[in-house]
């Protein structure tokens, strides 16, 4: 007899938060806080008493679930992501899940593709608000969606019985106390949108805004404004308040004006979406669209250009990660082509990177430089290995300190060799990079065809979150999405210190604002921490103005430099620190280990093996896992923590080496500033033998205290 489970979001969440529940393929009441009932022969329902009337439920075939080789944490996390997406169509999943649709049917990787090729076969019943996960397919036994007929496993009577029963489920006093000990909010909401909006609606925030925020909010409808400010200064809140104000304006509503909030990734789009819903009294504003740039370009420019190639990455952030992984692989092959005479004239920085082991800090720095060279120099200028004239010009051109560090001809020949291997691979797999899609889209958006469609498909108001993350071509693409070709109306917010592109794009003509506003006051940091963040902020060449702190608390300790004698001592310290914060069980205490280090996995494994709940963010897609975790420690590379806020941060800088050029110094400073500015109360900076120069300077100014380990 077939066995099926009918689960709500909150029951899956309880399973994910219960260690015993995660150890079994059978999800039900082995997890604390989950009740069960037999709905009909072979169908078991599970609920917590926290179910919502309008939510989607998951019907899961137990036999299919038992066949999966991935860990249940990932499997259930992906199921909940589908439920949330089904409730707000169109269904859209991260690119790495490789989703396909046929009518109301859906297939996607059940767990990471690195583990295997198993895919869910599911169908979405919007009338019953149920997503049925009733089959598995893989590379050995492929089943096409168009040929798959899901079994009729759930009757209307059984579903009605479940809803009536779930409404009667109550939690025990012990379970309610346990839920409170984890805190009332899941981590993604608490450290993301919740940290920004604090649960207050638009009307309440009108009484809390600072004068400079009020000026931006109340600017004329046709004003284009560039907002600049440090971490914690309320940039994102200001952008979202402006979006709500526009969405309620009579002229905007009556004129059927279209408002777009464009982000760099799906994770950031979700954060903005949640903020807008909270500000708008729990409902999404109907005339505001929140999407990553890449999705918009594929939908608009892609349909005009009839693009058929696969795009490596669902958003700009994911595209960057996938190309960097390919470059890391191709670097070894390109190195084999380098002659002895060429090595003799290569720069020291490049030689050290070539000789370093894969995964080391030195190797990673070279790979990042290669990525910036290919994406920022070669591709935009149309320099390809087959174009001898442009190649010759590239190999001899003068370079300045704002460009990646490839000063010699031999260095640039290596770049061309890696680029050649990348292009060959893309041709072989029939794919393009996200950056190439942007370049192609710009060309399409400059055509007569788009000019005809501009009035129907373009946007009247465009608001851009985290502008510093967008390169010059992406900014140009954004400017071309406007409904009115001349005089685009936009609002952008940025902290130039959190990204490399703002400095490079200062001369760009795209997105030239008529007005520029600076938010000087930061609200996130306690006094001791603020002094250190302010010092880091002042070290960026673009930041001439001083920032100030909104509140002062001299009792809060200064940030601390923790210097470990060796790796074992360092990771032991991380495990003990995570356990210390978890033991406090305070609602607002959450800890993140932000890694600027090749030993990120060692930190994660030490915390996990010590028994503390921990989530490892290896990409922007992994941020979704925080949607279903409460009070888990977070381990992440510095690139993936933008837009989050934690009470406690440990900035892990292990295995670092001295920077040899201005470009590398700026990247290191950006990583340290972005990681440190995620903390609101307590910051420890964990180093080993090498301490970056900017930290040594802060130590000499007594902005940091110091502790020696081992």
Image: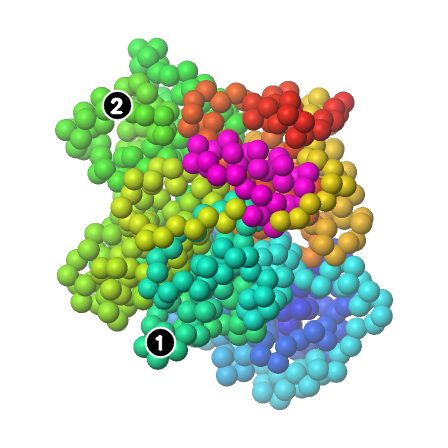
Q: Residue at the location (37% across, 35% down)?
A: 372
Residue 536 lies within the magenta run: yes
Lateral position of residue 58 relative to residue 178, left or right: left
Q: Is residue 349 above or below residue 78?
A: above
Q: Nearer the viewer, residue 204 or 50?
A: 204
Residue 428 is situated, as x and y percent measured from the top left of the image, at 29, 43
Q: Nearer the viewer, residue 589 or 532?
A: 532
Q: Nearer the viewer, residue 69 or 175?
A: 175
Give SS at disc 1.
helix
* Residue 262 quadrant: bottom left
* Residue 586 quadrant: bottom right
Marks 2 and 1, Cα distance to the nearest angstrom? 52 Å
Q: Nearer the viewer, residue 553 or 352?
A: 553
Label disc, if present, on residue 251 of the rendered structure: 1
Give SS at disc 2.
loop
Q: Is residue 475 above or below residue 392?
A: below
Q: Which residue carries the number 2 mark?
A: 398
Lateral position of residue 42 relative to residue 506, left or right: right
Residue 557 is situated, as x and y percent measured from the top left of the image, at 74, 37
Question: In the rendered view of the protein, which quadrant contains the C terminus?
Answer: top right
Residue 195 lies within the magenta run: no
Residue 295 is situated, as x and y percent measured from the top left of the image, at 37, 59
Stretch in magenta:
521-549
Residue 334 is situated, as x and y percent measured from the top left of the image, at 34, 26
């Amino acid at each position: 007899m077939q066995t099926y489970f009918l689960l709500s979001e909150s029951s899956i969440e309880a399973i994910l938060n219960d260690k015993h529940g995660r150890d079994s393929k059978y999800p039900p009441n082995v997890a604390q806080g989950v009740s069960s009932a037999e709905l009909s022969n072979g169908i078991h329902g599970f609920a917590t008493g926290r179910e919502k009337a309008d939510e989607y439920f998951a019907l899961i075939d137990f036999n299919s679930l038992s066949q999966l080789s991935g860990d249940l944490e990932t499997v259930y996390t992906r199921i909940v992501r589908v439920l949330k997406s089904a409730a707000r169509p169109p269904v859209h999943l991260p690119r790495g899940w490789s989703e396909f649709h046929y009518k109301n049917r859906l297939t996607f990787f059940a767990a990471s593709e690195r583990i295997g090729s198993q895919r869910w076969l599911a169908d979405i019943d919007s009338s019953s608000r149920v997503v049925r996960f009733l089959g598995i397919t893989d590379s050995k036994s492929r089943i096409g969606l168009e040929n798959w007929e899901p079994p009729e496993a759930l009757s209307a009577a059984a579903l009605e019985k479940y809803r009536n029963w779930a409404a009667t489920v109550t939690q025990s006093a012990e379970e309610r106390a346990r839920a409170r000990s984890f805190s009332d909010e899941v981590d993604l909401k608490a450290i993301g949108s919740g940290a920004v909006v604090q649960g207050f609606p638009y009307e309440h925030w009108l009484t809390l805004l600072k004068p400079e925020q009020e000026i931006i909010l109340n600017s004329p409808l046709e004003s284009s404004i560039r907002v600049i400010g440090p971490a914690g200064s309320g940039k994102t809140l200001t952008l979202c308040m402006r979006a709500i104000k526009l969405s309620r304006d009579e002229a905007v509503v009556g004129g059927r004006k279209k408002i777009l909030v464009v982000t760099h990734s799906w994770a950031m789009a979700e954060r903005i979406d949640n903020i807008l819903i909270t500000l708008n009294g729990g409902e999404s504003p109907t005339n505001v669209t929140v999407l990553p740039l890449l999705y918009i370009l594929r939908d608009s420019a892609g349909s005009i250009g009839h693009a058929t190639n696969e795009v490596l990455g669902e958003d700009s952030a994911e595209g960057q990660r996938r190309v960097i992984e390919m470059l890391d692989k191709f670097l070894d092959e390109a190195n084999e082509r380098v002659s002895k005479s060429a090595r003799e004239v290569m720069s020291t920085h490049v030689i050290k990177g070539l000789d370093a082991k894969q995964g080391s800090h030195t190797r990673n720095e070279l790979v990042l430089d290669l990525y910036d060279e290919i994406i920022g120099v070669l591709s935009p200028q149309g320099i390809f290995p087959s174009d001898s004239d442009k190649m010759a010009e590239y190999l001899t051109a003068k370079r300045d300190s704002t460009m990646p560090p490839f000063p010699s001809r031999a260095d640039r020949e290596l770049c061309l060799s890696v680029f050649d291997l990348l292009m060959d691979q893309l041709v072989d797999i029939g794919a393009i990079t996200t950056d190439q899609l942007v370049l192609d889209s710009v060309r399409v958006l400059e055509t007569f065809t788009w000019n005809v469609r501009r009035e129907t498909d373009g946007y009247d108001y465009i608001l851009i979150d985290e502008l510093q993350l967008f390169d010059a071509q992406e900014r140009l693409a954004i400017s071309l999405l406007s409904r009115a070709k001349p005089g685009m109306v936009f609002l952008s917010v940025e902290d130039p210190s959190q990204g490399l592109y703002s400095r490079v794009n200062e001369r760009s003509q795209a997105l030239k604002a008529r007005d520029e506003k600076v938010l000087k006051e930061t609200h996130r940091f306690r006094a001791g921490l603020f002094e250190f963040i302010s010092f880091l902020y002042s070290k960026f060449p673009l930041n001439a103005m001083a920032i100030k702190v909104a509140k002062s608390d001299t009792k809060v300790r200064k940030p601390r430099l923790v210097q470990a004698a060796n790796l074992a001592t360092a990771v032991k310290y991380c495990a003990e620190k995570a356990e210390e914060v978890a033991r406090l069980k305070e609602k607002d205490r959450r800890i993140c280990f932000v890694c600027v280090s090749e030993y990120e996995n060692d930190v994660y494994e030490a915390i996990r093996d010590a028994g503390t709940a921990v989530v490892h963010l290896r990409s922007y897609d992994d941020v979704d896992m925080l949607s279903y975790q409460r009070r888990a420690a977070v381990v992440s590379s510095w690139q993936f923590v933008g837009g989050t806020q934690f009470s406690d941060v440990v900035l892990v800088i292990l295995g670092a080496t001295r920077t040899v050029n201005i470009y590398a110094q700026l990247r290191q400073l950006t990583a340290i500033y972005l990681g440190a500015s995620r903390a609101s109360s307590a910051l420890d900076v964990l180093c080993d033998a090498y301490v970056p120069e900017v930290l040594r300077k802060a130590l000499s100014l007594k902005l940091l205290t110091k502790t020696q380990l081992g």
